[in-house]
């Protein structure tokens, strides 16, 4: 049995925290190994349609692909497949969720602390509270190092009915300006059912 960790008057189980970290690491690594995870028979071309999950829906960029997200422990994963010659990372957007007793502020603080602790050189440089489909959400942006490259990501975090959702878009920092508008549009299209 693992010892609970105190958090703002509540406790969380070490296994839950470790499970969240494992999902985070998998999400970071997926951009490096996406073609290995999604062989051609598991890819469907989506032409700007909505992805409808069991608890949410989200718009997908035209021409991006989706694969077997269960294999990577995410609920949805979209990848921009047009890799430039020698580009080591595929731009992607993913959705994860988990049960939580935290309100959105505590949940965001806990996840930012986890990012700073587990991602090499993670720097949070933007945070914005907003409303997404009537639900309070927090948008955060940051950079981190992975395999000698600097990556930039944007995450939309929200909580509803004791379930937290994180929608993340990630690209190489050098490509961020080109992909930021599409990533922002996808994040803002997220709606709970």
Image (spheres, rainbow, N blue to C red):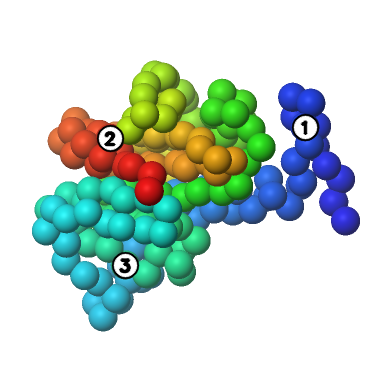
Name the quarter where the N terminus is drawn. bottom right
Q: Which residue is mark 1?
A: 10
Report x, y in % for residue 154: 36, 33
Q: Nearer the viewer, mark 3 or mark 1?
A: 1
Q: CA distance from mark 3 to mark 1?
A: 37 Å
Q: Secondary structure at mark 2?
A: helix
- Residue 159 at least partly seen: yes
**Residue 61 left/right relative to 14:** left
User: Quick one: 51 or 161, which is closer to the camera?
Assistant: 161
Report x, y in % for residue 23: 54, 53
**Residue 69 left/right relative to 176:** right
Res 40 → quadrant: bottom left
Q: Earlier in the sequence, mark 1 or mark 2?
A: 1
Q: CA distance from mark 1 to mark 2?
A: 31 Å
Image point 83% across, 42% down: which residue?
4
Q: Residues within 10 Å of mark 3 (few under 14, many from 20)?
A: many
Q: Which residue is mark 2?
A: 188
Q: Secondary structure at mark 3?
A: loop
- Residue 175 at least partly seen: no
């Amino acid at each position: 049995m693992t010892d609970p960790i105190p958090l703002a008057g509540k406790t969380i189980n070490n296994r839950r925290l470790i499970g969240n970290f494992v999902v985070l690491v998998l999400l970071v690594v997926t951009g490096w190994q996406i073609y290995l995870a999604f062989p051609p028979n598991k890819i469907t071309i989506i032409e700007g349609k909505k992805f409808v999950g069991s608890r949410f829906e989200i718009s997908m960029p035209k021409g991006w692909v989706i694969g077997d997200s269960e294999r990577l422990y995410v609920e949805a994963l979209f990848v921009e497949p047009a890799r430039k010659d020698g580009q080591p990372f595929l731009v992607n957007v993913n959705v994860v969720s988990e049960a939580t007793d935290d309100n959105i502020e505590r949940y965001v603080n806990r996840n930012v602390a986890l990012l700073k602790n587990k991602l090499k050189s993670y720097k949070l440089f933007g945070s914005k509270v907003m409303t997404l489909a009537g639900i309070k959400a927090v948008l955060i942006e940051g950079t981190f190092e992975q395999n000698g490259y600097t990556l930039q990501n944007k995450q939309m975090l929200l909580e509803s009915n004791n379930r937290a959702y994180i929608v993340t878009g990630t690209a190489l920092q050098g490509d961020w300006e080109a992909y930021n508008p599409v990533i922002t549009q996808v994040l803002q299209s997220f709606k709970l059912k």
